Amino acid sequence: MNHQLVIVLDFGGQYNQLIARRVRECGVYCEVKPYTTSVAEIKALAPIGIIFTGGPGSVYDLKAPQADPELFRLGVPILGICYGCQLLAHNLGGRVTAAQENTAREYGKTETFFDPDCKLFRGLPPQSVTWMSHGDYMEKVPEGFSLVAHSDACPNVAICDESRGFYGVQFHPEVNHTENGFGMIRNFLYKVCGAKGDWTMGDYKAAAIRQIREKVGSGKVLLALSGGVDSSVAAALLAEAVGNQLTCVFVDHGLMRLNEGDEVEQAFAKWDIHFVRANAEALFLSKLAGVTEPERKRKIIGEEFIRVFEAEAKKIGKVDYLVQGTIYPDVIESGLGDAAVIKSHHNVGGLPDYVDFKEIIEPLRLLFKDEVRQLGRELGLPKYLVMRQPFPGPGLAIRIIGEITKEKLDTLRLADFIFRDEIAKAHLEGTMNQYFAVLTNMRSVGVMGDGRTYDYTLALRSVTTTDFMTADWTRIPYEVLDRVSVRIVNEVPNINRIVYDITSKPPATIEWE
Ligand code: XMP
């Protein structure tokens, strides 16, 4: 099926995929293309609209990415964002200059005033906050353009020439800080470009399956399944695309939450794939015996994980493709450079060195987390898997302070299950991003019935965050905490005291180890 297409022309801005994601959210298919894409190629794709992204440069810098002037003669509506707006002005006869310090140069949240007659702002409030990040500004607006937004510091925040369908905004409508940014993008698509909203995640799924089949042919594919959302959705997509050419190796290290291993296995039972569940609980427990130091636990688990995976992969022989569930935020984060190592995160990223394969496939590379969840639902994965909160690779091992034993794992599993169960019953999942129990190695005196107890203290942790880099502790209602506490002390042996962790990150981290 052919869809209407919007092209996001990438001039090097940091939010280019976020723009693409907003367009997809509006039900319109879009592709991000480099600014060097030829006009002939763009024309052949027959887009209904083009969006110029932001970029790091100044339009007068000779090395800065430039727009081909032919683009303005295609008869296709254009929305220029930030640098893209300046390109528009520069190419169509306006003048862009470096803003003077403290005058029109703007960074951050800015109160902005809009002309509601402009199609871009129609139906939206005439005044709202936008997110600015520009050093240059349009000193002279091009012929035929009107000024349609301003702020206190800058008279030229947005311009348009509605007869040609050209719009430019100095701020970033794609980021959440711009209050009505989504509405503006929507207006551009629907009111300017004539979008019909003919694209769904189902179409994305169909296209992804087609592309995977073309690429893989009759080749063999291997995937390390962790049971997390990303690797599960990648596995389901590959299962749907190439069926029994796929082998999923699920390393069950015995450090998962209650019933999790079985749930993962069940979720994949409906596909005709090779599903290998390596039951390595005993091996992991023996390697972890007596280990109390958090980084050491992580190292052992990371190493053993690779070893078990490698052993299983060897049984399959040479594979052609290795699948990884990398998603777009991983791509951005890995580009950030040498951030200080606070904890050595273990995930499957380190595998390629150990397995003999031709190429890596990363089918989720351009998707954001909630899009991955949507795709997972589209592929028929169960809700409990698709909506799963983040769970660290080393599992419950880093939620048991001190030595790990099977008994402690079972204690923690049950307590953690009760906590999650009560949160679900109170319909509070949407108010928190990660919530779990931690078994401390502290014991204290209690009284139960007529007897003295001397048992472990369990900590409950719940955080609210958008990026997991910083987080606030969740204000869980007291009555819910009370129910959780009463149930855990009554139903879980070896625990006689419950505490709630009320530290944010920083200074604490989300996990306790
Ligand atoms: P921290 O504890 O560093 O956690 O504030 C931030 C987020 O990362 C998760 N986390 C991990 N994820 N392997 C992972 O795949 C790990 O070793 C690991 N350690 C922490 C943590 O659950 C939280 O979502």
Image (cartoon, rainbow, N blue to C red):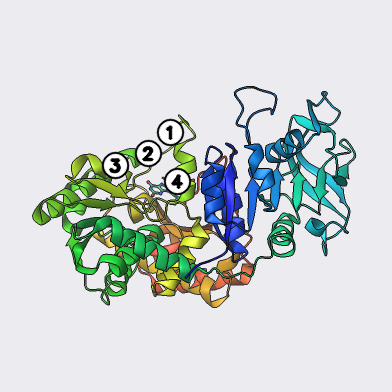
Left or right, 11 with respect to 498, comes to: right
Q: Is residue 471 left or right of residue 366?
A: right
User: Is 293 in front, or is 493?
Assistant: 293
Residue 198 in the image: x percent, y percent?
57, 70
**Could you tell me residue 295's position as x and y percent?**
34, 39
Which of pointers 3 and 2 lies earlier in the amino acid sequence?
2
- Mark 1 sits on what residue? 341
Of residues 284 and 36, the one nearer the viewer is 36
- Disc 2: residue Cβ within 8 A of ligand 1's nearest atom: yes
Quick one: label 2, few (<14), some, or many (20+) residues within 10 Å?
A: few
Would you say 276 lies left or right of 461 here? Answer: left
Which residue type carries mark 4? Asp
Secondary element type, mark 1: loop
Mark 1 / mark 3, whichever is N-terminal: 1
- The image shows residue 5 at horizontal and vertical percentages of 56, 59
Which residue is under mark 4?
A: 330
Q: Is mark 4 within 8 Å of ligand 1?
A: no
SS of the residue under disc 2:
loop
**Three-letter code for the amino acid on which mark 1 is drawn:** Val
Q: Residue at x 14, y 55 (%)?
A: 312
Looking at the image, do the residues carrying marks 1 and 3 touch, with CB atoms under 8 Å apart? Answer: no
The answer to which of marks 4 and 2 sits earlier in the sequence is 4
What amino acid is at disc 3?
A: Gly
Check disc 2 and report the residue beneath it: 344
State the CA–CA distance, disc 1 to disc 3.
16 Å
Image coords of residue 377 (percent x, y): 44, 72
Q: Is mark 1 within 8 Å of ligand 1?
A: no
Calculate the distance from the C-alpha at mark 1 to the C-alpha at mark 2. Answer: 6 Å
According to the image, label 3 marks what residue?
350
Crowding at dot 1, Cα within 10 Å, few <14 / some 14-19 / many 20+, comes out as few
